[in-house]
Amino acid sequence: MTAAESFESFSSPWTLARRAERMNPSILREILKVTDRPGILSMAGGLPSPESFPVEAMRAACERVLRDTPREALQYAASEGFAPLREWVAAHLAVQGMAVGADQVLITTGSQQGLDLVAKVLVDAGAPVAVETPTYLGALQAFAPMEPVFASVASDADGPLPEAVAALSHDAPGTRFLYVLPNFQNPSGRLMPEARREALVAAAKQAGVPLVEDNPYGDLWFDEAPPRPLAARWPEGTIYLGSFSKVLAPGLRLGYVVAPRALYPKLLQAKQAADLHTPGFNQRVVHEVIRDGFLDTHVPQIRAMYRRQRDALCEALREHLPAGSEWQPPSGGMFCWIRLPAGCDAVALLPQAVEQGIAFVPGAAFYARQPDARTVRLSFVTLTPDEIRTAVTTLGALLRRHLTEDAPTPTP
Amino acid sequence: MTAAESFESFSSPWTLARRAERMNPSILREILKVTDRPGILSMAGGLPSPESFPVEAMRAACERVLRDTPREALQYAASEGFAPLREWVAAHLAVQGMAVGADQVLITTGSQQGLDLVAKVLVDAGAPVAVETPTYLGALQAFAPMEPVFASVASDADGPLPEAVAALSHDAPGTRFLYVLPNFQNPSGRLMPEARREALVAAAKQAGVPLVEDNPYGDLWFDEAPPRPLAARWPEGTIYLGSFSKVLAPGLRLGYVVAPRALYPKLLQAKQAADLHTPGFNQRVVHEVIRDGFLDTHVPQIRAMYRRQRDALCEALREHLPAGSEWQPPSGGMFCWIRLPAGCDAVALLPQAVEQGIAFVPGAAFYARQPDARTVRLSFVTLTPDEIRTAVTTLGALLRRHLTEDAPTPTP
């Protein structure tokens, strides 16, 4: 029985909003329910490694905040966020080439909330919103309640194609923004190189399509730091989203939006209406943890750990994936994206994979339109290198068996 | 220069959503900026007394959570909320006569977020939403982005009039819900008595208008516990919102929604899209604080403190308010509502009050339609009894002077 049926069968005084009629349980969520069983070697989740959580620093910071400013930390607080944390964010972004004031920083309850606020302020029902192909599922979910029409911009291994962005002005006139995740994208793991960034910004300006730039993984580079953010290249045309989830811990739900000053008041009003403010206690604890350069030593440790896991994954993929598989070694982040050989359907293969004790996410969930059934997202940060090798060996065997058994009889 | 002007004067690639064009800075927020200056005896804020924050219990709970379950507390978590906390909520509500399962409890980032989720799931642009007269400003702000048409239901000292609720079926056909705050309402302080609850629920059923019942203050009763919630009387027709902000601390941003099972999946999907989940760390810390009956001793202490402040306020009001003022002693909560004598305009008087070193909130902000300019909301929980007496003495003198100076020449 689906939720809609259960709703209908109920003699009910409630009328759902049109947007709610369209809401459906996240495919990913349903998959994760199946795959998060004990004993499964899961490469499905998007969870950072708990090995990376700075528990002792958190403990000390909670202690200090509750000793020094308990009343301020536990009271209602400003919707903009904790001023010293906003200043820290502005200073942190300056290092990456973004010249922003603390007055442009809005602290959010995870960067997921930033996506919700952006949609509330910029999206009318029926208005086009452009996304990458593939794109972050959580963004599709955050934007969907405002009922946009998604335009899925043709993309390659470097990100959205500039010509496809330029074409938005006639393909999807009135596009409210292009949502783009340039660093180690979820799900594809791809990094947008310098030349593509320049070309993309030029095309977006030409098309009059502003940008929403999401950067949860940018600090997790393995070899060299990513090129400057898009927001540094077009400050008045870009809303930038950042997060502490991947460099500290997601359970604190702490992110931020950096907005052009002309947009900031509207985002702030939307924020106030959404949850008044992000927990002040969390903001002060995180500021206490990071204020004296903690991340300068902590983040390199995460990078080194994830790099080892990435190396184990790539070595195993090279060894075990059948011919015809397409993938590139990710240069940062948490995810590797694979296109399976022709004849593979990742959704259909998942139950067999789970039966064999492994799990992945079929890539189809990450497309706004026309999913590619052959794609798979693997997270490499939750299993140890040994577990990764075991899991990929199993995956390879499964695929080979499938390709042999289901191989179509060659036509003469 | 207004925000709109600054936006317009800016050569901008952005197009605002229609809802954002309507968003305006909260009047209350602007007032609080003026009145939160040091030295002002402010009765304006809606802040619980920081004297009531359980700092030591919080400290111990943070310590235990980070010692016993650091990885779980700092990792991504279920959108529904922390299971033991959901079970605690269900058990807590059972005591108040609500028979709900933990599976009906959705943990939210403050109950303000509950209002946002309810609006997303139930409100289409142009659909009527009924509210009390006056009503909680934060609810108007949370609902407004979904562009309802507000119906302001005629109300008296006991709450909304049942005949006005019954009339919604022809006055505002298709009303999605009636938002009602029966216990020590913000702003009016009023308590809905047993008879009105019965009559209201009967009228709502008759009109086919479901209820959204908000109960942030219900535990803060001074003499006797409020009558059973509306949700206990009409479970399948009521969404119930609760909060830990007033019995523990608002800076944790922890609230909950209890929904009929037919609606729960949609609210959950809206929650997931809004911020994935409420900070797991906060949920575990609060559960750790309250699990062994902490509130049974803590809440009576808050009641006793607030009762003393209420008594000081009422005594001072009786002594100092000019004839023609209308008010009732609140029997719980944080607020007292006053209707000033004819000839008083609370918005116009506020700057003079601030000049004299006191502050209040003009009641006009709390009306969906046709504000009563003579109304004022006073919070009695942030000042000491002595400060309250001083502030009300000043207020009384200001009003008397105003009424004498501005008295219209009597017509013969």
Image (cartoon, coloured by chain):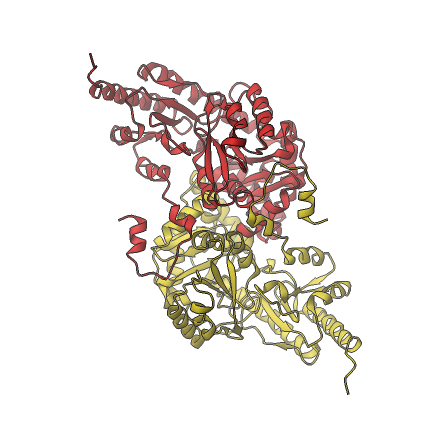
Chain colours: A yellow, B red
Judge by depth and name the residue closer to the eye, B175 or B79.
B175
Determine whether B88 is above or below A40 in the image.
above
Residue B357 image-quadrant placement: top left
Find the residue positioned furthest to the front.
B170
> In the rendering, at what x and y percent does residue B119 appear?
52, 42
- Count of number-bearing discs: 0
Does residue A98 show up?
yes
Find the residue positioned furthest to the bottom.
A412
**Residue at 55% of width from left, 62% of height from top?**
A136
Instruction: Describe residue B143's horizontal placement relative to residue B385 as left or right.
Output: right
Does residue B215 show up?
no
> In the rendering, at what x and y percent does residue B90 appear?
65, 35
Image quarter (top left, top right, bottom left or bottom right) of the C terminus of chain A = bottom right
> In the rendering, at what x and y percent does residue A220 appear?
51, 66
Residue B83 image-quadrant placement: top right
Determine whether B58 is above or below B187 in the image.
below
Determine whether A369 is above or below B235 in the image.
below
Determine whether A42 is above or below B248 in the image.
below
> In the rendering, at what x and y percent does residue A283 appear?
46, 49
**Residue at 29% of width from left, 51% of height from top?**
B5
Instruction: Describe residue B385's horizontal placement relative to residue A323 as left or right.
Output: left
**Residue at 59% of width from left, 32% of height from top?**
B208
Judge by depth and name the residue closer to the eye, A248 or B231.
B231
Judge by depth and name the residue closer to the eye, B286 or A411.
A411
